[in-house]
Each structure stands twice: as C-alpha cells, then as structure tokens.
Amino acid sequence: GIGNIYIADTNNHRIRKMTPVGVVTTFAGSSQGFSNGTSSAAKFNFPMGVAADPSGNIYVADSGNNRIRKITSTGVVTTIAGGPAGFSDNAGVFARFNSPQDIAIDVSGNLYVADVNNARIRKITPTGIVSTLAGSGVSGFNNGTGSVAQFNTPMGVTVDAIGNVFVADTFNDKIRKITPAGIVTTFATVPTPTKVLVDAFNNIYVTNSANGSSGHQVFKINASGVGGTALGTTVFGGIDGYGAQVRFYRPVGM
C-alpha cells in the first residue's frame, strides 16, 4: 500500500515491511536458502536491492541466489529471472546473473539490474526477457554504446522518468548515465559511489559507504551533472545537522 517501506534485510535473508506508523513485519523470507512460496515459506540468499511498482509488487535483487525475485502484494514470491551464477541473455529462468546487487524499475515496468560480478547493467522486460543494456563483462572504464562500455563493480542503479539509467560505478569513482538506446557517458565523479537515487527534479543522490579517508558521505548532484553538494565529511560518526556538520558511518541505501 501507499507509504509502506520495504527493506532488504540482507543478513537476515528477509524482506521487511514498515508501515507509515513504524510497525515492522517480515513480508517475505525466512532462513537462508532458495525457494519460492508465500511469505515465510520463501527463502532468499543475501537480498541486496528492492524496487516497487505502482501495483504493489516488490522486486528483489537476490544477490546470493543470482536471481531476480518478485513478491506480490499478498506475499507470493516467484523467480522472474536467473539461476546458477553465470552470464546469459535469455528469457526468465534461462537467463544468468552473477551477484546482482541493485534493481530499479521504470514507468513501463522494465527492470534494470546492477549485475556486479558480470560488470554489466541488465534490463528485464515485463515479459521476463533479459538483455544487456550496457557493459562488456570485462571490468574497466570505457564510455560508448552497449557492449563497448565498461564498468568496474557497478553496485547501484536508478532510472529517471524518461528511461535514463544512472549507475553507481563504484570502483571507477563515477556516476555513469545510460540512455534508453544504451549510450553510456560519465555523468559525475564521486568517490566510491555505492547507491544512487533520482528524484522528480532529476537530482541524483549518491551514497559513499567506503570505510576510509574518502567515505561516509551522501552527495546531491543536479540534473546537469554538476553542483555536487556533500552531506557529511570523510570523518565518520553519528551527528545530525546540516551540510558539513553531519556525520555518517558507511551509508548505503536510500
């Protein structure tokens, strides 16, 4: 329903639901493993990313199972795509992923997956056809179209209202932009970006969860790819406030 928050509770291997008044329940999942089923009969293996559609379906990047899962509003869990670890563009359970860690959905119901260990961004149509939007499978850095482009451990994805996909290209220290035609460019430079989120005004928000001298910040980048504003500093902590007053400690999801 409207206003519920769904959380990938990774090391509990569950998807949790929080209502607008803060009541938390287990929406799906139980012990670590793999099975389809309803609510606690289903099993996940280190679920990392979630996305929701307007009908109340939840989509999960089930990282340790190398699968993309769907949970209906009534808690019925199925497998949309994927199987054993590997790489294959195919239909549904014949497709292969390798440690998918984030997922986003566009207005047409297409899913976009940060397929980390394949160094690719994958696309899944509403009918379950999996293709590669961009990436060669070789870790590196290159702009270009489709399989000409290269990423290095792309850990986050988000998609705007017109179908542009933004990628947290983590170990390239870049935010990359992919058009619906698969053209990859560099949108912004950010140290060790982990997750990305786009708002209704096309501002991009980026978490940096690195644990070290370049980490612990949240960045806001405007639609032109400039004007990066940092919340927090590279000194970790737990302080509320404004701008550089704020302290985070390895922030990940938004």
Image: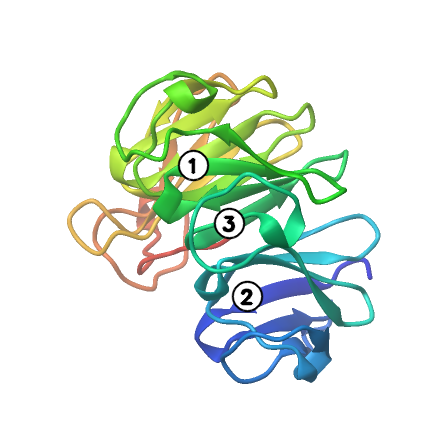
Between marks 2 and 1, how big is the CA–CA gap? 22 Å
Identity, as a three-letter code, of the amino acid under mark 3: Arg
> Mark 2 or 1, which is nearer the eye?
1
Position in image of residue 213 (x %, y %): 15, 48
- Residue 150 quadrant: top left
Residue 233 appears in the picture as rendered = yes
> Mark 3 or 2, which is nearer the eye?
3
User: Where residue 162 is drawn, which disc sits there?
Assistant: none
Q: Earlier in the sequence, mark 3 or mark 1?
A: 3
Q: Residues within 10 Å of mark 3 (few under 14, many from 20)?
A: many
- Residue 228 quadrant: top left
Q: Which residue is mark 3?
A: 96
Identity, as a three-letter code, of the amino acid under mark 2: Ala
Q: Are marks 3 and 1 in contact (CB under 8 Å)?
A: no
Between marks 3 and 2, how big is the CA–CA gap? 21 Å
Residue at position x 39%, y 32% in the image: 229
Position in image of residue 179 (x %, y %): 56, 19
Residue at position x 32%, y 53% in the image: 209
Identity, as a three-letter code, of the amino acid under mark 1: Arg
Between marks 3 and 1, how big is the CA–CA gap? 12 Å
- Residue 23 quadrant: bottom right
Viewer-proximal residue, 230 or 200?
200
Label 1 residue SS: strand
> Mark 3 or 1, which is nearer the eye?
3
Q: Which residue is mark 2?
A: 8
Label 3 residue SS: loop
Where's the N terminus, which quadrant? Answer: bottom right
Q: Residue furthest left?
A: 213
Q: Residues within 10 Å of mark 1 (few under 14, many from 20)?
A: many
